[in-house]
Image (cartoon, rainbow, N blue to C red):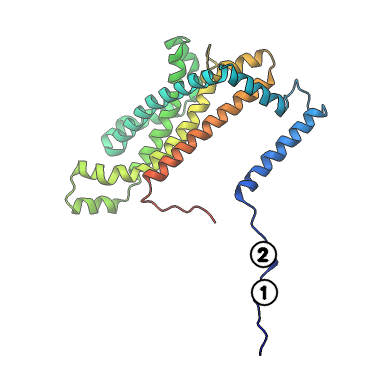
Amino acid sequence: MSPVLEPVVPLSARRRPVPRWLRRTTGPLLLLVLWQVSSATAVLPSDILASPGTIAGTASDLLQDGTLPHAMLVSVQRVLIGLLIGGVVGVALALISGLSRLGEDLVDASVQMLRSIPWVGMIPLFIIWMGIGEAPKIALIALGVTFHLYLNVYAGIRGVDAQLIEAGTALGLGRWGLIRHVVLPGALPGAMTGLRYSLATAWLALVFGETINADDGIGFLLNRAREFFQTDVIVVCLIVYAALGLLADFIVRTLERLLLQWRPNFTGK
């Protein structure tokens, strides 16, 4: 009876793969440990940067007394209003410019000229025009959002395959039928990309906007903490900005997967 031969399995194949979540969290955890040790040994003085433990305690206090939730609510409201106004303006201009050559001649040059101006540099004019209330903050967010959505929606419209237009025409679709069934679905990936960029810009604009004599919001906490050298509160505010930005990006990614199920994507190996 001949012996049973077992296939040779490489040692690397026998090892259990490290979970992806563990690989992704190892770096940040090591950084936190190094940060805490540096603070405990006075290598990193507390007046330069508070320790992770102190920051966690400060965050807990701000949550319990309601200061942080209220500030988050105010800031999120500003972003949503600015995003809505900027989104409507940006998409409307992109539709006018993308669907018509006449519209492009009338709109695109002006938008490109305004886009070349740093939107942060508009703060002094916004203060002169609108005062120091909520209006200039929201206007700054809306301005930053408008350009990203305009560029991506316009590029998405003009990037629709001409053969699809010809096929739709051959099937009897009129101009509005082509726009509804061919052009707008084809431009949707660009619009979703523009929305993601717009959200990132909205949070950045919020940071600048809330420096305009804000009396509430995350930026108000940030500026007040700067005046009193409260590095723990400053880091808490920065973490909140980052967390809200990540949450917004996650929502858009989820929406993108739902709306673009018809488009297969490469997800890596």
The residue tagged 1 is 8
Residue drawn 25% across the image and 45% down it: 181
Give 159 or 247, whichever is nearer the viewer: 247
Q: Is residue 157 left or right of residue 52?
A: left
User: Where does the image place residue 150, in percent across and percent down from the top left?
Assistant: 38, 33
Locate residue 24: give its quadrant.
top right
Q: Amino acid at mark 2?
A: Arg
Total marks shown come to 2
The residue tagged 2 is 14
Q: Is residue 171 left or right of residue 127?
A: left
User: Where does the image place residue 81, in percent across and percent down from the top left?
Assistant: 41, 22
User: Where does the image place residue 125, in percent across and percent down from the top left?
Assistant: 46, 14
Residue drawn 18% across the image and 48% down it: 173
Give the structural element (helix, strand or loop) at label 2.
Answer: helix
Quarter of the rendering occupied by the C terminus: bottom right
Give 118 or 77, whichever is nearer the viewer: 77
Quarter of the rendering occupied by the N terminus: bottom right
User: Where does the image place residue 56, in percent across and percent down from the top left?
Assistant: 67, 26
The correct choice, above or below, for 240 with respect to 11 in the image is above
The correct choice, above or below, for 161 with respect to 37 in the image is below
Give the structural element (helix, strand or loop) at label 1.
Answer: loop
- Disc 2 vs disc 1: Cβ atoms closer than 8 Å? no
Locate residue 50: give its quadrant.
top right
Residue drawn 39% across the image and 42% down it: 190
Residue drawn 43% across the image and 33% down it: 148
Residue 202 tag number: none
